[in-house]
Image (spheres, rainbow, N blue to C red):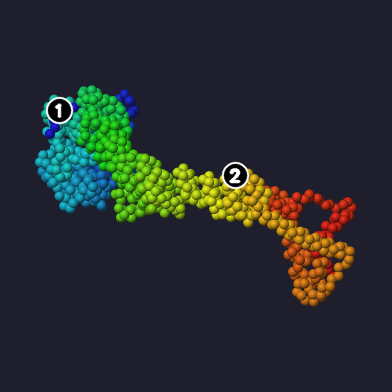
Amino acid sequence: MAAFLQWRRFVFFDKETVKDPGDAGKGFTLPAGISACDSGRGHIVLGDMEGQIWFLTRSMQPTPFQAYKLRVTHLFQLKQHSILVSVGQDEQGINPLVKVWNLDKRDSGNPLCTRIFPAIPGNKPTEVSCLSVHENLNFMAIGFTDGSVVLTKGDITRDRHSKTLTLHEGTSPITGLAFRQSGKTTNLFVATLEKVLCYTLSLKEYPHVELDTHGCALRCTALTDPSQDSQFIVAGDECVYLYQPDERGPCFGFEGQKLLVHWYRGYLLLLTRDCKTPNNREASPSEKQLLTVYDLDNKFIAYSAAFDDVIDVLAEWGSIYILTQDRRLCVLQEKDTQTKLEMLFKKNLFVMAINLAKNQHLDSDGLSEIFRQYGDHLYVKGDHDGAIQQYIRTIGKLEPSYVIRKFLDAQRIHNLTAYLQALHRQSLANADHTTLLLNCYTKLKDSSKLEEFIKTSESEVHFDVEIAIKVLRQAGYYSHAVFLAEKHTHHEWYLKIQLEDLKNYQEALRYIGRLPFEQAESNMKRYGKTLMHHVPEETTQLLKGLCTDYRPSRETPADRESLGHPLGNKANSEEFIAIFVNNPRELRAFLEHMMEVEAQCPQGVYDTLLELRLQDWAHEQDTQEKNSLQEAVLSLLKSENYSTVFDKALVLCQMHNFKEGVLYLYEQGQLYQQIMHYYMQNEEYGKVVEACQRYGEKEACLWEQALGYFARKEEDCKEYITAVLQHIDRNNLMPPLLVVQTLAHNSTATLSVIKDYLINKLQQESEQISEDERKIREYREETTQLRQEIEELRSSAKIFQKTKCSMCNSPLELPSVHFLCSHSFHQHCFESYAESEAECPACAPGNRKVMEMLRAQDQKRDLHEHFHRQLKCSNDGFSVVADYFGRGVFNKLTLITDPPGGKAGAASLDSNLQRDLLIHTKRTV
């Protein structure tokens, strides 16, 4: 039980007297003889002793109407409906009437009365003591002075749809009634002078529970808001009790005779008799009454003031109105939240300010400002632990640097650590905050806190992991940094710490082997040289797997199938060759492994392996082993998968003077002149001749080069010169004059060397001359014959004596067609087979070939490049020149034009005649 005398007192309400709207300088005057009051739906309802009901609007404009003939005793205004329930008298005696008014409907300008019924329990005339109506309009309870409670169930606004029953009977007058709705459960609290009960109306037979054995006076009950769980308040002279439907709740020791209880927005309003006045319930004209406003949650008195002869206290329009017997109306206006908080701040009552702000549903920014001021207050007082707790509550609103600057002192590092931890828990820390927190841990040597911080589950990580790793590494907490990097898959940081700080190369290599393919590949490229230097064999094994069929060491085939991953990935082995720069033995093993398992390796793998084998061959002293290495090099060069781009291989073989490899690559590249030059450089005469014999058909100039080579030699090379000359003579590769000029440079070569060659050549020339003379005679005879035929055609008539058609061999019949070439055709045969009317069908194919040859000669007449190229590549340039002479390439072109007057000269006649002979002009008989 809390004594109210220990509660702090404040003035959170401003008291004013309501002014008359017609006269601002004069107070508002209430109607005389007020006997009942209530408020709701935007007005104050008053009942007087003359049976009138008054409605006061916010502008204090009173509107009366006659509700009863004698007096109004009770009023109940529903808050959710425009329904007013009143109890009064229309005639003398004890005969109370209940009337239900619909304020939205009018009857002759007055509210519509929808129902009237007498309030009599069990046909016994009894005065009504209290009244309560449920907001759903389905229940109405009337309490009487004889201890009875009458319950009306159903639609209270109509007679037909409701029924009335006596719910409670007793001997003690009923002093308070209140309905409570919780879900589908409806309860009715009943208070008498002697006890407190609760009926459950949602159950059959309306069971009840006796909550207490002492009651209260009339008008000393109220019901709290739903936010306060709708508790039933009973104010006794010694204590104020709060009740639930099934038990009694907290109580408060507010002493004094209670005259009135009211609940308003979380405040408990108590009207008590002033202790200085005589102790009797009959108020004298000068009696003082004390109105106190209590905040039960925060345990303080929000307002307290004395009034004279209070009739009632009502709440409407966000204010509290006090009606007094002197017909005055006072209003209590609650101060705004900020003003109340400032009053609390001045008294350093921050805890109370926080609670008040929460009750007033102040926004988070307002609460944060209170926490900041409270923290500043505690910090100034030296309570750093308490201050940091308040600053923690400002996280998200107050700039963290404001707090951090206050606690950077080494003596307050514990407080700073607590604040930074809270900052991280709310995921509001940046990289600097993480760095600072970890530095705090390391300064405090608090390994347990450090481990707790970094070992939180991934869903609870509230810091920048990479920054944390950096700080831990700088502070020398390598194991913690490694744990954090591995847990959050920061592979680069994990490997960097393992290799650079812990020098744990084996573990770093195993870690890479557990990574997915892309990450394993990138990290091996980054750290491969370091790992190869310290753990070469293990690194080589990992690279073999990475470049063939990589599978992470933690991943099983079943896992891959379930995840839908391919069976393996392959890296480009050529990209890892640089890792083996100082490890040739491991490099050789790696490259040979790649050659074995891969059908097609990158070019760099072959080139590098070739270089390694050539180095071994060059440095090997043992003959047998050297021959074995030579075979290995040649087998590599001859492998089917070796690329056709062999420039690098050729350079390598030349650098190491690997003769067999050089010659093989020359041959593969069709560099036959290079092969012969190689033999020439090494003065291997027999090999030179063999090279000419082997490759001379593919490149004929080799024989010329060989002859020139031997001609320049001063040694006795007659044997080789003779062999070369025989081949040149046999294939007519060089003119004799050029052969003689070439051998003239050799002082040791005598005429006997080329005697047989020259004799043979002279014989061939002689035979060629004879053959040419014979052809000249034949051509002259043919020319003479053609001239004679031309002359005959010019000077004599042509007699056509053909008796058969040249096309169908049938006897000729008229009409027929004859040509000067002595071919004759039926008219219909000629028309069927002839392609042109001016050309003989039988001679057309031959004529066409001749014309094509002429056109070809005309087209090739200006093809100088083609002529020079053919002349250069031909073994007999003279024959090429003669051929072009025959085509008329070197003839002077003469244009023949018709002379003036349309007469053609002799040359024109000859040319026309030749054309006619060529195309055999058609003659028709």
Q: Mark 2 Cα within 10 Å, few/some/many (few <14, many 20+)?
A: some
Q: Quadrant of residue 41?
A: top left
Please name whichever residue, 454 or 785, is drawn nearer the observer in this view of the structure. Answer: 785
Residues under numbered marks 2 and 1 in contact, where contact means CB atoms less than 8 Å apart: no
Q: Position of residue 207 (x, y in %)?
A: 15, 49
Query: Which residue corresponds to the image point at 52% horizontal and 48% vertical from the top-left?
Result: 684
The residue at 47%/49% (across/down) is 660
Position of residue 135 measured from the top left corner of the image (x, y, whole percent): 25, 44
Q: Amino acid at mark 2?
A: Arg
Residue 5 marker: 1
Instruction: Give the camera-side residue of 827 and 394.
Output: 827
* Kind of residue at disc 1: Leu
State the separation of the CA atoms marked 2 and 1: 136 Å
For the point 48% across and 44% down, the residue is 654
Q: Would residue 132 be found to the left or right of residue 632 on screen? A: left
Q: Name the one closer to the observer, 892 or 856.
A: 892
Quarter that holds the C terminus: bottom right
What is the crowding at mark 1: few (fewer than 14 residues within 10 Å), some, or many (at least 20)?
few
Q: Is residue 285 left or right of residue 510?
A: left
Q: Is 83 placed left or right of 289 in the picture?
A: right
Task: Give the SS element for disc 1.
Answer: helix
* Residue occupying image coordinates x 12% and y 27%: 278
- Residue 333 in which image quadrant: top left
Q: Is residue 516 above or below residue 51?
A: below
Dot 2 or dot 1: first in sequence order is 1
Please name the residue that numbered disc 2 is placed on.
712
Q: Residue 721 shows which numbered tag?
A: none
The image quadrant that residue 459 belongs to is top left
| Residue sticking out furthest to the bottom | 811
Answer yes or no: is residue 880 visible: yes
Q: Secondary structure at mark 2?
A: helix
Q: Which one is closest to the eye, mark 2 or mark 1? A: 2
